[in-house]
Image (cartoon, rainbow, N blue to C red):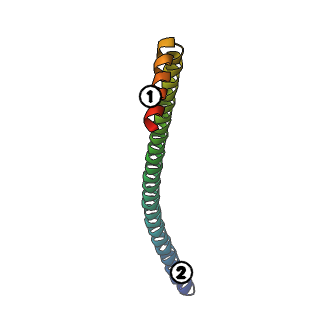
C-alpha cells in the first residue's frame, strides 16, 4: 500500500483541483450569463426607445403631410368655388353690364 500512496495522493489532489476548476468555471459562466442577459435587456430597451422615436417621427411627418394636403385641397376648392361663382355670375346680363360699365369708368379715370 505504501507504493500506491503517492499515486493516491496525486489522484486526490487532481480530483480536488478538477472539482475546484469546475466550480469556478461554472460560477464564472453563470456570472457571464447574467451579464449578457442584462446587456441584452438594455439593448432591447434601447431598440424599443429607438422604435418609439421613429414611430413618433413618422406620425409627425404623416400629420404634416395630411395638413399640407388639407390646405392644398382647401385652396383648390376655394379657387374652384370662386371661379365657378364668377363664371356663373358672368352668365347673367346684369352682372356683365355692371362689369363692362366698371371697366369703362376705370379707363376714364386713368385718362
Q: Is residue 68 above or below residue 44?
A: above
Q: Provide residue 89's location: percent of width, then percent of height.
A: 49, 17
Decide: few, some or many residues near mark 2? Use Cα within 10 Å; few <14, some 14-19, many ≥20: few
Viewer-nearest residue: 63 or 36? 63
Mark 1 or 2: in front is: 1
Query: How many marks on residues?
Result: 2
Label 1 and label 2: CA atoms lie apart by 130 Å
Q: Provide residue 16's location: percent of width, then percent of height.
A: 48, 76
Viewer-nearest residue: 88 or 65? 88
Q: Disc 1 marks which residue?
A: 105
Viewer-nearest residue: 29 or 93? 93
Tag shown at residue 12: none
Find out whether the residues at labels 1 and 2 contact each other: C-beta distance under 8 Å: no
Comes first in the chain, label 1 or label 2? 2
Q: Is residue 64 above or below residue 88?
A: below
What residue is rendered at 43% in x and 64% in y?
35
Tag shown at residue 8: 2
Q: Provide residue 11's location: percent of width, then percent of height.
A: 54, 79
Q: Quadrant of the N terminus?
A: bottom right
Q: For numbered disc 1, what is the local secondary structure?
A: helix
Q: Is residue 9 above or below residue 38?
A: below
What residue is rendered at 45% in x and 42% in y?
64
Q: Residue pushed farthest front?
A: 111
Q: For numbered disc 2, what is the local secondary structure?
A: helix
Decide: few, some or many residues near mark 1? Use Cα within 10 Å; few <14, some 14-19, many ≥20: few
What residue is rendered at 49% in x and 81% in y?
13
Q: Tell me where residue 24 sits by quadrant.
A: bottom left
Viewer-nearest residue: 3 or 47? 47
Amino acid at each position: 500500500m505504501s507504493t500506491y500512496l503517492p499515486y493516491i495522493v496525486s489522484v486526490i489532489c487532481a480530483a480536488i483541483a478538477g472539482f475546484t476548476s469546475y466550480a469556478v468555471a461554472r460560477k464564472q459562466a453563470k456570472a457571464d450569463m447574467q451579464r449578457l442577459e442584462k446587456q441584452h435587456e438594455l439593448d432591447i430597451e434601447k431598440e424599443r426607445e429607438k422604435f418609439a422615436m421613429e414611430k413618433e417621427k413618422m406620425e409627425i411627418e404623416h400629420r404634416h403631410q395630411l395638413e399640407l394636403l388639407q390646405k392644398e385641397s382647401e385652396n383648390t376648392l376655394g379657387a374652384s368655388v370662386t371661379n365657378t361663382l364668377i363664371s356663373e355670375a358672368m352668365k347673367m346680363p346684369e352682372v356683365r353690364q355692371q362689369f363692362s360699365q366698371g371697366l369703362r369708368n376705370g379707363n376714364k379715370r386713368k385718362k
